[in-house]
Amino acid sequence: MSELGVQIDRYVQELVRGGNSSHTVEAYAADLRQFLDYLSPPETEPPAATAIDLLTLREWLASLYSHELSAVTIRRKLAAVRSLFRFLLREGLVPVNVARLVRTPKAPQKLPVVMSAGEANALIDGVPGDKLERPHPARDRALFELLYGCGVRVSELAGLNLDDLDRAERWLRVRGKGRKERQVPVPGKAAEALERYLAVRPVEGDQPAVFLNHTGGRLSARGIHGIVKFYATYVSGDPSIHPHSFRHAYATHLLADGADLRAIQELLGHARLSTTQKYTQVSLTDLMAVYDKAHPKA
């Protein structure tokens, strides 16, 4: 393996040790492998890290544009390379993080599509539907109630353990990005659905996971995605709905009902308030739509 390839592997291992989510690790690892492939034409060794200059990175960036990748994807790939060079600088393997000199492509401001409260509740109410004959209706209903009622990420929901539940006080201990923990209140309907599920949850030795798959192991984030897509397709007729759709709805509906933006930031586990502020834009967009439809002077 080339020297640069070895350093990329070391960096990915550090990401794992640093507690980054599996999604982040896999995405960065894939982006850096592609970066290494670009620097390694057939029968050619990639250059040493110290030999990668600003011109090389600009040519690499141009190749990404030539493949008509979105600005969001290019930004992520550039972030992975910058992070790699930050690691190399810290290790004393390069004199400067040359990737910081590359301009970040501007991403279009894209507001999330948010379900109305009625749409979200109609979907959740249809989850245990008898016509669908699903094998674990109580589990599936609890999944949906927690996604919408607590606004958790799908990875956080999959990672929930039994000892993270305070059933008496109705709180969840959630492990977010970077293993940061936060407390999230569980509303009444979600608490009821969770209790119904736990009453029928099979006992699988010392398995700590709250949500189990058909083999008795921990239900994965991918498994939750599949469950949500199934019900979204057959109950709402909208396969574009995914677990994060409920997080968007949770934040937007809280804001619309008067919740403080910083309180929502804490509930969502956002490191920066600017991340939470996109929901104010969604609410304003919805408000203008109502105005345009209803006001006589619109």
Image: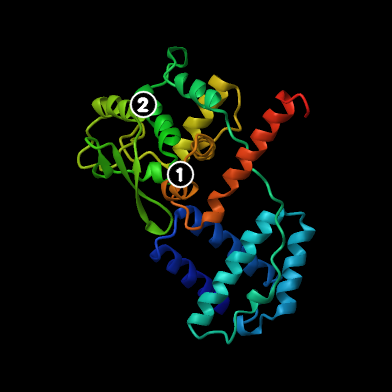
Residue 231, given in percent of the width and then of the height, sits at 51, 25
Judge depth for marks 2 and 1 and give the one in front. 2
Q: CA distance from mark 2 to mark 1?
A: 19 Å
Left or right of 238: which side holds 7?
left
Q: Residues within 10 Å of mark 2 (few under 14, many from 20)?
A: few
Q: Which of 132 and 37 lies nearest the eye of the viewer?
A: 132
Q: Which of 210 and 30 lies nearest the eye of the viewer?
A: 210
**84 in relation to 201, above or below:** below
**264 in relation to 60, above or below:** above
**293 in relation to 252, above or below:** above
Name the residue furthest front: 297
> Residue at the location (27% across, 44% down)?
164
Q: Which residue is mark 2?
A: 189
Residue 269, given in percent of the width and then of the height, sits at 43, 51
State the SS at label 2: helix
Q: Which of 161 and 287 lies nearest the eye of the viewer?
A: 287
Q: Residues within 10 Å of mark 1 (few under 14, many from 20)?
A: many
Using the rendered image of the protein, determine whether residue 138 is visible from the camera's viewpoint. Answer: yes
Left or right of 70: which side holds 194?
left
Q: Name the image quarter holding the N terminus.
A: bottom right
Residue 153: which numbered mark, if any? 1
Query: In which quarter of the view is residue 31 placed?
Result: bottom right
Q: Name the image quarter holding the C terminus.
A: top right
* Of pointers 2 and 1, the one earlier in the residue sequence: 1
Query: In which quarter of the view is residue 94 placed?
Result: bottom right
Using the rendered image of the protein, determine whether residue 44 is visible from the camera's viewpoint. Answer: no
Which residue type does callout 1 highlight? Answer: Arg
Left or right of 119: which side holds 134?
left
